[in-house]
Image: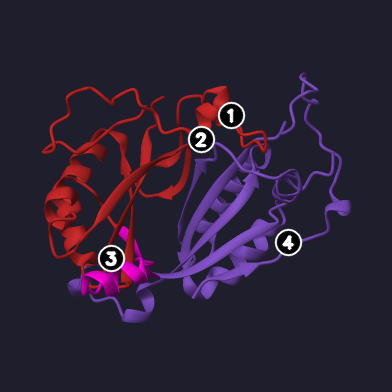
Chain colours: A purple, B red
Protein backbone atom coordinates (compact mmCIF):
# COMPACT_ATOMS: atom_id res chain seq x y z
CA UNK A 1 0.00 0.00 0.00
CA UNK A 2 2.44 2.59 1.14
CA UNK A 3 5.95 2.63 -0.16
CA UNK A 4 8.81 4.84 0.82
CA UNK A 5 10.59 6.47 -2.06
CA UNK A 6 14.32 6.77 -1.44
CA UNK A 7 16.09 10.05 -1.89
CA UNK A 8 16.43 11.42 -5.39
CA UNK A 9 20.08 12.31 -5.30
CA UNK A 10 22.92 12.19 -2.81
CA UNK A 11 23.21 15.09 -0.45
CA UNK A 12 26.71 15.80 -1.77
CA UNK A 13 25.19 16.62 -5.13
CA UNK A 14 23.05 19.37 -3.69
CA UNK A 15 23.38 22.71 -5.43
CA UNK A 16 24.59 25.71 -3.48
CA UNK A 17 21.78 27.48 -1.71
CA UNK A 18 20.87 30.64 -3.59
CA UNK A 19 19.02 32.36 -0.81
CA UNK A 20 20.70 34.59 1.72
CA UNK A 21 22.38 32.64 4.49
CA UNK A 22 20.53 32.72 7.74
CA UNK A 23 21.42 35.69 9.91
CA UNK A 24 21.45 33.71 13.08
CA UNK A 25 24.31 31.26 12.81
CA UNK A 26 23.30 29.62 16.04
CA UNK A 27 20.15 28.29 14.45
CA UNK A 28 20.55 24.58 13.95
CA UNK A 29 17.73 24.40 11.44
CA UNK A 30 17.87 27.48 9.24
CA UNK A 31 15.71 26.01 6.49
CA UNK A 32 12.04 25.51 7.13
CA UNK A 33 10.50 22.22 6.11
CA UNK A 34 7.01 21.71 4.80
CA UNK A 35 4.83 18.69 4.17
CA UNK A 36 3.60 18.76 0.60
CA UNK A 37 0.51 16.63 0.00
CA UNK A 38 -0.34 15.89 -3.61
CA UNK A 39 -3.41 13.96 -4.73
CA UNK A 40 -3.16 12.68 -8.31
CA UNK A 41 -4.61 9.96 -10.53
CA UNK A 42 -2.97 6.65 -9.70
CA UNK A 43 -1.59 6.05 -13.17
CA UNK A 44 0.23 9.39 -13.07
CA UNK A 45 1.72 8.95 -9.60
CA UNK A 46 5.16 7.83 -10.76
CA UNK A 47 5.41 10.87 -13.00
CA UNK A 48 4.60 13.24 -10.16
CA UNK A 49 6.95 11.45 -7.76
CA UNK A 50 9.80 11.91 -10.21
CA UNK A 51 8.78 15.51 -10.80
CA UNK A 52 8.84 16.31 -7.10
CA UNK A 53 12.22 14.68 -6.65
CA UNK A 54 13.69 17.36 -8.88
CA UNK A 55 12.87 19.88 -6.14
CA UNK A 56 15.36 18.36 -3.72
CA UNK A 57 12.74 16.19 -2.10
CA UNK A 58 14.54 13.28 -0.46
CA UNK A 59 11.65 11.55 1.25
CA UNK A 60 8.30 10.75 -0.28
CA UNK A 61 5.53 8.40 0.70
CA UNK A 62 2.97 7.22 -1.80
CA UNK A 63 -0.38 5.92 -0.54
CA UNK A 64 -3.23 4.41 -2.52
CA UNK A 65 -6.57 6.14 -2.21
CA UNK A 66 -9.74 6.84 -4.10
CA UNK A 67 -11.90 9.84 -4.72
CA UNK A 68 -15.35 10.41 -3.32
CA UNK A 69 -17.18 11.23 -6.51
CA UNK A 70 -20.84 10.35 -6.51
CA UNK A 71 -21.38 6.77 -7.66
CA UNK A 72 -24.08 8.05 -9.99
CA UNK A 73 -21.76 10.41 -11.78
CA UNK A 74 -20.91 7.77 -14.36
CA UNK A 75 -17.26 7.46 -13.48
CA UNK A 76 -15.65 4.08 -13.85
CA UNK A 77 -14.12 2.73 -10.68
CA UNK A 78 -10.65 2.97 -12.18
CA UNK A 79 -11.17 6.66 -12.91
CA UNK A 80 -11.70 7.15 -9.21
CA UNK A 81 -8.33 5.67 -8.26
CA UNK A 82 -6.01 8.18 -6.65
CA UNK A 83 -2.57 8.22 -5.16
CA UNK A 84 -1.70 10.54 -2.29
CA UNK A 85 1.92 11.65 -2.26
CA UNK A 86 3.39 12.93 0.99
CA UNK A 87 6.64 14.79 0.36
CA UNK A 88 8.93 16.61 2.76
CA UNK A 89 10.17 19.68 0.95
CA UNK A 90 12.23 22.70 1.93
CA UNK A 91 10.19 25.87 2.23
CA UNK A 92 12.26 27.77 -0.33
CA UNK A 93 11.43 25.11 -2.93
CA UNK A 94 7.68 25.11 -2.30
CA UNK A 95 6.82 27.98 -4.62
CA UNK A 96 8.64 26.48 -7.59
CA UNK A 97 7.21 23.04 -6.91
CA UNK A 98 3.64 24.29 -6.64
CA UNK A 99 3.97 26.42 -9.75
CA UNK A 100 5.26 23.43 -11.69
CA UNK A 101 2.54 21.19 -10.30
CA UNK A 102 -0.14 23.70 -11.18
CA UNK A 103 1.20 23.85 -14.70
CA UNK A 104 1.24 20.06 -15.00
CA UNK A 105 -2.27 19.74 -13.57
CA UNK A 106 -3.50 22.09 -16.28
CA UNK A 107 -1.63 20.57 -19.21
CA UNK A 108 -1.41 16.81 -18.70
CA UNK A 109 -4.36 14.89 -20.02
CA UNK A 110 -6.19 13.12 -17.21
CA UNK A 111 -3.46 14.30 -14.89
CA UNK A 112 -5.46 16.73 -12.83
CA UNK A 113 -4.80 16.84 -9.14
CA UNK A 114 -4.59 18.98 -6.10
CA UNK A 115 -1.57 19.89 -4.01
CA UNK A 116 -1.22 21.77 -0.79
CA UNK A 117 1.33 22.35 1.92
CA UNK A 118 1.15 21.89 5.66
CA UNK A 119 3.86 23.60 7.72
CA UNK A 120 5.94 21.33 9.91
CA UNK A 121 6.69 22.57 13.38
CA UNK A 122 9.46 20.25 14.50
CA UNK A 123 11.58 17.29 13.67
CA UNK A 124 14.19 15.48 15.70
CA UNK A 125 17.75 14.49 14.81
CA UNK A 126 20.35 16.55 13.00
CA UNK A 127 21.06 13.84 10.43
CA UNK A 128 17.37 13.46 9.73
CA UNK A 129 17.00 17.19 9.34
CA UNK A 130 19.93 17.37 6.93
CA UNK A 131 18.50 14.49 4.95
CA UNK A 132 15.06 16.04 4.74
CA UNK A 133 16.36 19.49 3.85
CA UNK A 134 19.02 18.10 1.51
CA UNK A 135 21.64 20.30 3.15
CA UNK A 136 24.96 19.20 4.57
CA UNK A 137 25.80 22.32 6.55
CA UNK B 1 -2.72 32.32 12.98
CA UNK B 2 -5.38 32.18 10.29
CA UNK B 3 -5.13 30.16 7.11
CA UNK B 4 -7.54 30.30 4.23
CA UNK B 5 -7.75 26.53 3.87
CA UNK B 6 -7.61 23.63 6.26
CA UNK B 7 -7.07 19.94 5.61
CA UNK B 8 -9.46 17.83 7.65
CA UNK B 9 -8.41 14.27 8.36
CA UNK B 10 -11.17 11.98 9.56
CA UNK B 11 -10.22 8.45 10.65
CA UNK B 12 -13.20 6.11 10.69
CA UNK B 13 -13.93 2.40 10.63
CA UNK B 14 -13.78 0.92 7.16
CA UNK B 15 -17.00 1.44 5.26
CA UNK B 16 -17.94 4.75 6.80
CA UNK B 17 -16.21 7.07 4.35
CA UNK B 18 -19.45 7.73 2.51
CA UNK B 19 -21.11 8.82 5.73
CA UNK B 20 -18.18 11.11 6.36
CA UNK B 21 -18.55 12.72 2.97
CA UNK B 22 -22.30 12.94 3.30
CA UNK B 23 -21.97 14.82 6.58
CA UNK B 24 -19.22 17.05 5.22
CA UNK B 25 -21.09 17.89 2.04
CA UNK B 26 -24.15 18.95 3.99
CA UNK B 27 -22.16 21.81 5.49
CA UNK B 28 -20.40 22.88 2.33
CA UNK B 29 -17.42 20.61 1.71
CA UNK B 30 -16.78 19.76 -1.93
CA UNK B 31 -14.99 16.43 -2.20
CA UNK B 32 -12.52 14.22 -0.48
CA UNK B 33 -9.98 11.45 -0.83
CA UNK B 34 -10.23 8.14 0.97
CA UNK B 35 -7.11 6.34 2.12
CA UNK B 36 -7.23 2.78 3.46
CA UNK B 37 -5.39 2.25 6.72
CA UNK B 38 -4.94 -0.10 9.65
CA UNK B 39 -5.57 0.86 13.24
CA UNK B 40 -3.21 -0.22 16.01
CA UNK B 41 -5.35 -0.90 19.04
CA UNK B 42 -3.80 -2.30 22.20
CA UNK B 43 -3.93 -6.07 21.63
CA UNK B 44 -3.54 -6.88 25.33
CA UNK B 45 -6.38 -4.59 26.27
CA UNK B 46 -8.56 -6.15 23.61
CA UNK B 47 -8.04 -9.66 24.99
CA UNK B 48 -8.39 -8.45 28.56
CA UNK B 49 -11.74 -6.83 27.97
CA UNK B 50 -12.93 -9.39 25.45
CA UNK B 51 -13.67 -6.90 22.73
CA UNK B 52 -12.38 -6.51 19.23
CA UNK B 53 -11.52 -3.16 17.81
CA UNK B 54 -12.00 -3.13 14.09
CA UNK B 55 -8.48 -2.63 12.76
CA UNK B 56 -9.45 -1.70 9.25
CA UNK B 57 -9.80 2.05 8.95
CA UNK B 58 -10.34 4.67 6.34
CA UNK B 59 -8.79 8.11 6.42
CA UNK B 60 -10.87 10.69 4.66
CA UNK B 61 -8.93 13.76 3.60
CA UNK B 62 -11.09 16.82 2.95
CA UNK B 63 -9.77 20.21 1.92
CA UNK B 64 -12.09 22.97 3.10
CA UNK B 65 -12.09 26.71 3.49
CA UNK B 66 -11.32 27.77 7.03
CA UNK B 67 -14.72 29.44 7.30
CA UNK B 68 -16.50 26.10 7.31
CA UNK B 69 -13.87 24.08 9.16
CA UNK B 70 -15.69 24.15 12.47
CA UNK B 71 -19.01 23.29 10.87
CA UNK B 72 -17.46 20.31 9.10
CA UNK B 73 -15.73 19.09 12.26
CA UNK B 74 -18.94 19.36 14.24
CA UNK B 75 -20.88 17.57 11.53
CA UNK B 76 -18.33 14.76 11.55
CA UNK B 77 -18.44 14.59 15.35
CA UNK B 78 -22.18 14.05 15.30
CA UNK B 79 -22.35 11.81 12.22
CA UNK B 80 -19.34 9.54 12.66
CA UNK B 81 -17.88 10.45 16.06
CA UNK B 82 -16.61 8.05 18.68
CA UNK B 83 -20.12 7.47 20.00
CA UNK B 84 -21.27 6.18 16.64
CA UNK B 85 -20.55 2.99 14.75
CA UNK B 86 -18.04 4.86 12.62
CA UNK B 87 -15.93 5.57 15.71
CA UNK B 88 -14.36 8.48 13.92
CA UNK B 89 -11.69 10.89 15.00
CA UNK B 90 -11.36 14.12 13.05
CA UNK B 91 -8.75 16.85 13.18
CA UNK B 92 -7.69 19.76 10.99
CA UNK B 93 -4.28 20.90 9.84
CA UNK B 94 -3.53 24.37 8.52
CA UNK B 95 -2.88 24.58 4.79
CA UNK B 96 -0.49 27.23 3.63
CA UNK B 97 -0.55 27.03 -0.17
CA UNK B 98 -2.96 25.30 -2.51
CA UNK B 99 -2.90 24.55 -6.23
CA UNK B 100 -5.33 22.59 -8.34
CA UNK B 101 -8.43 23.31 -6.31
CA UNK B 102 -11.25 24.26 -8.64
CA UNK B 103 -12.40 27.18 -6.57
CA UNK B 104 -8.96 28.26 -5.49
CA UNK B 105 -6.44 28.61 -8.27
CA UNK B 106 -3.44 29.45 -6.17
CA UNK B 107 -3.99 30.65 -2.67
CA UNK B 108 -1.55 32.10 -0.26
CA UNK B 109 -2.43 32.10 3.37
CA UNK B 110 -1.42 34.75 5.81
CA UNK B 111 2.24 34.79 6.77
CA UNK B 112 3.35 32.22 9.25
CA UNK B 113 4.84 32.86 12.60
CA UNK B 114 8.56 32.14 12.98
CA UNK B 115 7.69 29.24 15.21
CA UNK B 116 6.78 27.16 12.18
CA UNK B 117 10.41 26.21 11.73
CA UNK B 118 11.11 22.53 11.51
CA UNK B 119 13.94 22.22 13.90
CA UNK B 120 15.92 19.39 15.45
CA UNK B 121 16.29 21.57 18.50
CA UNK B 122 12.62 21.28 19.12
CA UNK B 123 11.14 24.22 20.86
CA UNK B 124 8.91 23.28 23.75
CA UNK B 125 6.22 25.57 22.46
CA UNK B 126 6.20 23.64 19.22
CA UNK B 127 5.89 20.28 20.88
CA UNK B 128 3.41 21.15 23.56
CA UNK B 129 -0.27 21.03 22.86
CA UNK B 130 -1.56 24.52 23.25
CA UNK B 131 -3.55 24.96 26.38
CA UNK B 132 -4.91 28.35 25.45
CA UNK B 133 -8.41 26.99 25.34
CA UNK B 134 -8.00 24.62 28.22
CA UNK B 135 -10.45 26.37 30.47
CA UNK B 136 -12.60 28.13 27.97
CA UNK B 137 -15.69 26.29 29.10
CA UNK B 138 -16.20 24.54 25.80
CA UNK B 139 -19.07 22.13 26.37
CA UNK B 140 -18.84 18.54 25.19
CA UNK B 141 -21.44 19.30 22.58
CA UNK B 142 -19.08 21.71 20.88
CA UNK B 143 -15.95 19.63 20.50
CA UNK B 144 -14.11 21.88 18.07
CA UNK B 145 -11.05 23.30 19.76
CA UNK B 146 -9.39 25.91 17.61
CA UNK B 147 -5.75 26.28 18.55
CA UNK B 148 -5.08 29.31 16.33
Give the image quarter of residue B137.
top left
B137 or A38, which lies in front? B137
Residues at marks 3 and 1 touching, judged by CB atoms closer than 8 Å: no
Marks 3 & 1 on one chain: no
Residues at marks 1 and 2 touching, judged by CB atoms closer than 8 Å: yes
Residue plotted at (23% across, 49% down): B29
On screen, A36 above or below B109?
Answer: below
The residue singled out by tag 4 in the image is A7
Per the rendered image, the range of residues in magenta is B32-54
Chain for numbered disc 2: B
**In this rendering, position of residue A53 left or right of residue A80:** right
Chain for numbered disc 4: A
Tell which circle, 4 or 3, labels the residue nearer the N-terminal end.
Answer: 4
The residue singled out by tag 3 in the image is A68
- Circle nearer the viewer, 4 or 1: 1
> Judging from the image, what secondary structure is the residue with disc 1 in?
loop
Q: Which residue lies furthest to the front in this view?
A: B48
Amino acid sequence: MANLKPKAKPIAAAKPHKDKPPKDKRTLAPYKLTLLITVVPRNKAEFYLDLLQSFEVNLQMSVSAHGTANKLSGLLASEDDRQVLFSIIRQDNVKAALTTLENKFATIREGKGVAFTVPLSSTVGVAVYRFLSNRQE
Amino acid sequence: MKYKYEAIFCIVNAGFSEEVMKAAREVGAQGGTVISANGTANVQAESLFGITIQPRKEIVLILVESDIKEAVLKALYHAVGLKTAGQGVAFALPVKDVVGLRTAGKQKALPQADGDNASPSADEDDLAISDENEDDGTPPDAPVIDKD
